[in-house]
Image: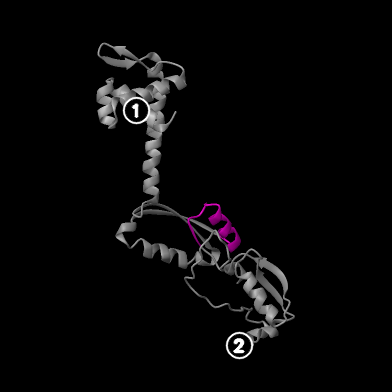
Amino acid sequence: MNLKQLYYFKMLAKTEHMTQAAEQLSITQPSLSHSMTELEKELGTFLFEKNGRNIRLTKYGHFFLSYVERSLNELEHGEKALKELVSPDRGHIDLAFIYTLGPYFAPLLLKEFQTIDAHQNISFSFYQGNTKNIIKSLKAEQSDIAICSMITPDDQLHFEPIAEEEIVLIVPLDHPLAYFDEIDLKNTAGYPFISFNKKSGIRPMIDAMLAEVNVVPSIVCEVEEDHTMA
């Protein structure tokens, strides 16, 4: 049984006329007749019976038709929904981004996107997380596009740099380092650190910077995003 046979069966059930059904399906009458014979053989029962010069559904044909119509309608709805989903003018986008982009960058990006008339029928869902979890959701196809904080070589993904930000050191106002306009990272040795956790895309960068000046940070707390850190 295949999808084409079901469409043929539905049309023949509608017209109850082999020649008319074949014309509307743009196939030959023998092809239609052969297809229905094969379908009946597979189902193990007659779906049609002669009615003078025409044909009509048997009670088994009526029974089967209800299932065929529901199945084909569901497939047509699915096809329509899928075409809308992948349409450049409508559909839904699952966007993932790191926590630090939530307060400003992501809302601004969405606002600018929606200023284009062709984008008015496109909706969004937002997912926030750290870089490792975001990349995981992207590879699992739970997200369509993601904005993270580092490029991780991966054959399954394409990375494109879109922005640069400075990495800065922040301290309390009464901290000994707060009295300097600038410092060398060596001067941070011996002080406790609040750092991003290891799932953060920026954590490897910070570890590498400190390793370059032979500083092994004493991390007393790990967080996921910079507002909590501050």
Q: Position of residue 168 (x, y in %)?
A: 59, 78
The reply to whether callout 1 and callout 2 are in contact (CB within 8 Å) is: no
Label 1 Cα crowd, 10 Å radius (few <14 / some 14-19 / many 20+): many
Q: Nearer the viewer, residue 85 or 101?
A: 85
Which amino acid lies under the numbered mark 2 shown in the image of this protein?
Glu
Left or right of residue 31, residue 102 in this image: right
Is residue 141 within the magenta segment?
Answer: yes
**Residue 52 position by quadrant:** top left
Mark closer to the observer (1, 2): 1
Label 2 Cα crowd, 10 Å radius (few <14 / some 14-19 / many 20+): few
Which amino acid lies under the numbered mark 1 shown in the image of this protein?
Tyr
The span shown in magenta is 129-146
Q: Position of residue 216 (x, y in %)?
A: 73, 77
User: Residue beneath label 1, please?
Assistant: 8
Question: From the viewer's perspective, is residue 24 above or below residue 89?
Answer: above
Left or right of residue 45, residue 168 in this image: right
Q: Position of residue 122 (x, y in %)?
A: 37, 54
Total numbered labels = 2
Q: Position of residue 135 (x, y in %)?
A: 56, 59
Q: Residue at x 36, y 42 (%)?
A: 80
Q: Secondary structure at mark 2?
A: loop
Is residue 223 within the magenta segment?
Answer: no
* Colour style of the rendered protein structure: one colour
**Residue 60 position by quadrant:** top left
Q: Nearer the viewer, residue 186 or 107?
A: 186
Q: Secondary structure at mark 1?
A: helix
Label 1, label 2: how far apart the Cα atoms are: 78 Å
User: Residue beneath label 2, please?
Assistant: 182
Mark linked to residue 217:
none
